[in-house]
Image: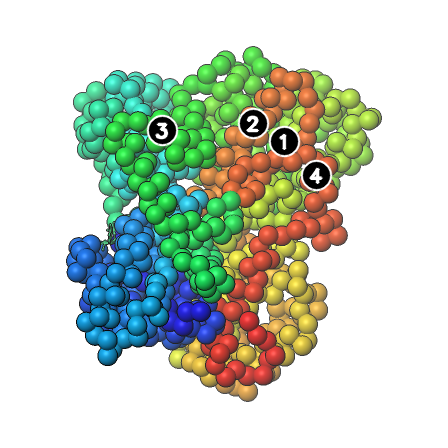
Amino acid sequence: MIKALGVMTSGGDSPGMNAGVRAAVRRAMDRGLEVYGIYYGYEGLLRGGDQIKRLNWQEVGNILQQGGTFLGTARSEHFKTVEGRRRAVENILERGIEALVVIGGDGSLMGAHVLSTEWPEHVEKIVAAHPDLYPPASQIPMLQVVGLPGSIDNDLTGADMAIGVDSALNHIVRAIDDLSSTAASHQRTFVIETMGRNCGYLALAGTLATGASWVLIPEEELDLRWHQKMVESLDKARKIGRPHQMVVVAEGARHPDGLLIGSNDVRSILVEKLGIEVRLTVLGHVQRGGSPTAFDRILATRLGVAAVDLLMDEPDVIHRHMVGIRRNKVVSTPLIEVVEKSREVRRQIESGDFKKAVELRGEAFQSMLDLVNTLTQITPALETGQQGRVVIMTGGADSPGMDAALCTAARCLLNQGVEVLGSRDEFYGLIHDDFIHLDWNELLGWVGHPSSDIGTARSDLLQGDFGRIAENIRKYNIKGIIAIGGWGTYQHIHRFVEMRSGFPEFDIPIMLIPATIDNNLPCTDLCIGSDTALNNIVEAVDKIRHTAGATKRAFIVEVMGKECGFLALMGALATGAEKAYLPETGISLTELNKDVIELRDSFECGKRMVIYMRSEQASPHYTTDFLRRLLEAESNNEFEVRSVVLGHVQRGGFPTAFDRILACRIGAEAAGALLKSLKNGSDEVLAFGLREGAITSCTLSEAVEQMDAVHERPKVQWFMDLYSMVHSLAKSRPWSENRPETGEGL
Ligand code: ADP
C-alpha cells in the first residue's frame, strides 16, 4: 500500500485543474496518505527543493473556483532527457513518494508513462551509487502513475470530455454571441479563430451552439473548391437577408493538400471575393482563462477522487493509467493507449486521411459534424410541405436551451420537407388555433435564445380541451408532435395518449424532449437547462464567497429543484459547499446537531466562510429560515449567519454551451425519429435523453415506469452516488486528524 503521493499539473493549463488537485489531495489525505504538491510540472519534479512541498488540507481550500493551476505548470525540455528524468527519480525517492497524479495533456501523460516504465532502471543506478541513502532497489520496484485528462482541445481518447473543454467552449460561445451583436449592428462578417491545432471539437461545437454560418476544422476533408463553396454560401445568405455572418476557423484547419489554412487567409478571401468588410478575431488565450464552469469543476473533482481510489483500492496492480469519464462513468485506460490513440488522429490528419480522423473521433463527433453541415445550409434540402405538417410545443416552466432544441428539431424537419407549426403556450395553440409558422432562416438565431419564443404554459388540460385538439389536428392535418418540456409536459402527453381510444386523431407519433432546470425527468441523465441553472448557482455562490471578510460567516443558499436534489448536490460539489440538504435524504435533528458541531470546528480550523446548499424542498419543517435561526442561535455571537434564496436567477440568462449542444443533439435525434415514424405510419411515443453519454430514447410506458410519481423525480438518480463526495471534500480537516465527536467516518 502506498504511503506518499505527489500531485502535479503539467503542460498547457486548463480551467478545472485546481478542482482536480483539491480532490486528489483531500481524498488522499482522507485515506491516510502524505501528499506532496509538485510545482511547475516536470520542471519542478526534476529541480526538487522547495518545488516539491508537503501539502495540507487547508492549502487546497478556496482554489476550486480559480482558473489556471495554483501548483503552476510548465513545459520541460530537460525532463525529456534520460538525465532529467534520473534527477526527477532522485527527488521522488528522497521524499518516499510512491505514486504520482498528473493532470495534463497527451505530452504530460506520455511523460508520466515514460517515467514509470523507466523507474526500475533509474532506481537501480541511484541506489547502487548511494546504498547508504536508500533501501534496496527491490523494495521500491515501481512508481504508480495516474493521469487526469487536462486539455482544452478535447483531443484525448479515454475521456468523453477533458478538464477545461467546457470552460473554453463557453468562452467561445460567449465571444461569438457578443461578436454577433456588433456584427448585426454594422452588418459585418467576422472570422473567428479558435484554439484546436489538431482537434476541431471547440470550433465545431462552438458553431453548433451559436448558429455560426461556416466552420473549418482539421478533421474535415475539404474539397479543392472549398473557398468557392464558402464564398457562394455566404453570398447567398447575404442576398436572402442575412448580412452578418460568422465564420469559425480552428487554428489547425487544413487545405486538402495538408497545408494549414490561416484565419487571415479566410478573411482575405472573403474581402476579395465578396467585396465586404470582414473582421478577424483570434480568440487566443482567453479560451483557457477564467474561472472553470460547473461541469469542469465537477468533472475534475470526480476524477481527482477516482485517481486516488484507483491507487488505493488496487495496490498490487501497476498503474500507468488515465482516469476519464466515458458514458458518465469513470473508466481507466492505459496511458500509452490514450497517447497513441490520441496521436493517431493527428497522424491521420497529417497524412490526409480525414475520413479516418473523423471516424477515430467517434460517433458523437461525426454526428455533430453532419448536423452542422445540415444546419449551415442556406435553404432546406427539400421544399417545405412536401412531407406533411407537424407541431412543436414547449411547456412547463421555461428552461434555457428550449429554443435550441426547438430550432434544431424544426430545422431538421424542414430540411426534409416537413412543415412545422409552433403551438403557442404548449397545448394552448392546439386548443385555440394559435400557431406560429416556423421558418428555416428565422430559426437560425434561436439557438442561443434564453427560453422559448413560442411560449410555455403550465395550465392543466381540461376534459373539453381534447375535442378541440382533435378538431385542430384534423383541420390542420397534423401528422406528429414534438413536445419540449418538464414534468408537466410529460404528464400532459401521457394524458393525451391515454385519450387515444376516444380520439383516433391522437394516433400520431410524439417525441418528448426533456427540458427543465430541475433535472427530474426519466430516460435521461441530464435535462436541457440544468447546466445553465447550475452555472447560475455557481456564479452566485462564487460572488457570495467574495464577500468573506473580517467576520466569519455561514451562508445557507436555497436553490431550486422541487423534489429533486440535483441542483443542490451538484451546486455544492461545484462550489465546495460543506453540505447539501436534499429532498432525497431529508433533514433530521440528529444531523443538524452534528452540523452545528462541525460548523464551529470549521471556524476553529480557520475557515472564514461555510456554505450550506439547501434544496427548496429538502424538508417541509426545517426550512431555510429555520436553519438560519438555528445556526444563529448556536453561534454564540462567534460568527454571522445569512441565508439567500437564489430564486428565478437560476433559470435566467443565455443557455450554456453544454445546454445548447445537448438541446441540438436531442432535437436532431427527435426530429429523425419523427421523420421515421411519419414514413412508417407509426404512432409511437418516445422520450429522448442523454444516457451514459449517448442520445437515446425510451417508450412512453418505459418513461412512466421510471417516474416516481409521488416525488416527481426518476426512481433512480445517478448523481446520488456523488452525495458523500460533497462533505468529504469540503469538511475542515481530514478524517485522520482529531475531529469533534460527530460520529462520522469515511
Ligand atoms: P501537454 O501535456 O499539454 O500535451 P506538452 O506536450 O508540452 O503539454 O507536454 C508537457 C511536458 O510533458 C513536456 O514539457 C515534457 O516535460 C513532458 N513530456 C512530453 N512528452 C514527453 C516524452 N515523450 N517523454 C518524457 N516527457 C515528455
Q: Which residue is mark 4?
A: 702
Q: Locate the C terminus by quadrant.
A: bottom right
Q: Which mark is residue 511?
A: 1
| Residue sitting at x 56%, y 65% | 724
Q: Which residue is mark 2?
A: 671
Q: Amino acid at mark 2?
A: Ala
Label 1, residues with CA under 10 Å away: few <14, some 14-19, many ≥20: many
The residue mark sitting in front, 2 or 3, is 3
Q: Which residue is mark 3?
A: 356
| Residue 314 versus residue 277 in the image, above or below | below
The residue mark sitting in front, 3 or 4, is 3
Q: Earlier in the sequence, mark 1 or mark 3?
A: 3
Q: Quadrant of residue 484?
A: top right
Element under disc 3? helix
| Residue 396 versus residue 138 in the image, above or below | above
Q: Earlier in the sequence, mark 2 or mark 3?
A: 3
